[in-house]
Amino acid sequence: MKDNLIQFKTKSESSKSMPEQEFTLIQEIRELLSEFHCNYPLVTKKAILLRIDQLTDELIFNKR
């Protein structure tokens, strides 16, 4: 971290050593995040957030 900037890996760098299952989970999380920005009712947005939370937990537990 230099000058308060975080250097993120590019998609091609980060996906090289990533197992297929992790890549699929991350891809689904990204798709849900893009859906979250749509003008859906609150109940639908809560469901999207719940699914993102579940996928994130699964991704974290797979890393251990």
Image: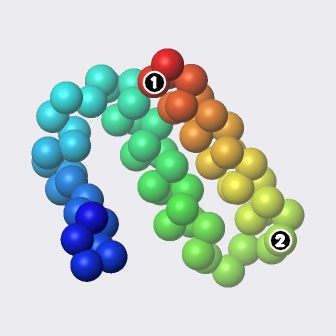
- Front residue of 58 and 48: 58
Q: Residue 28 at what x, y percent from top left? A: 48, 45
What amino acid type should be assigned to the residue bearing mark 2?
Answer: Leu
- Helix, strand or loop for disc 2: helix
Task: Decide: is 47 above or below 61.
Answer: below
Q: Which residue does the image show at 62% across and 67% down from the upper left?
A: 36
Mark 2 nearby-residue class (10 Å; few <14, some 14–19, many ≥20): few
Which residue is identified by label 1? 63
Callout 1 touching callout 2 (CB < 8 Å): no
Query: What is the quadrant of residue 6 in the picture?
Result: bottom left
Query: What is the quadrant of residue 2 in the picture?
Result: bottom left
**Which label was assigned to residue 42?**
2
Q: Which residue does the image show at 54% across and 31% down from the upper left?
A: 60
What amino acid type should be assigned to the residue bearing mark 1?
Answer: Lys
Q: Residue 52 at what x, y percent from top left? A: 63, 48
Tell me how many marks there are: 2
Horizontal side, residue 51 vs residue 47: left or right: left
Horizontal side, residue 15 vs residue 44: left or right: left
Q: Residue 15 at what x, y percent from top left? A: 22, 39
Task: Decide: is 14 above or below 63.
Answer: below
Q: Quadrant of the N terminus?
A: bottom left
Q: CA distance from mark 1 to mark 2?
A: 32 Å
Sequence-earlier tag: 1 or 2 = 2
- Helix, strand or loop for disc 1: helix
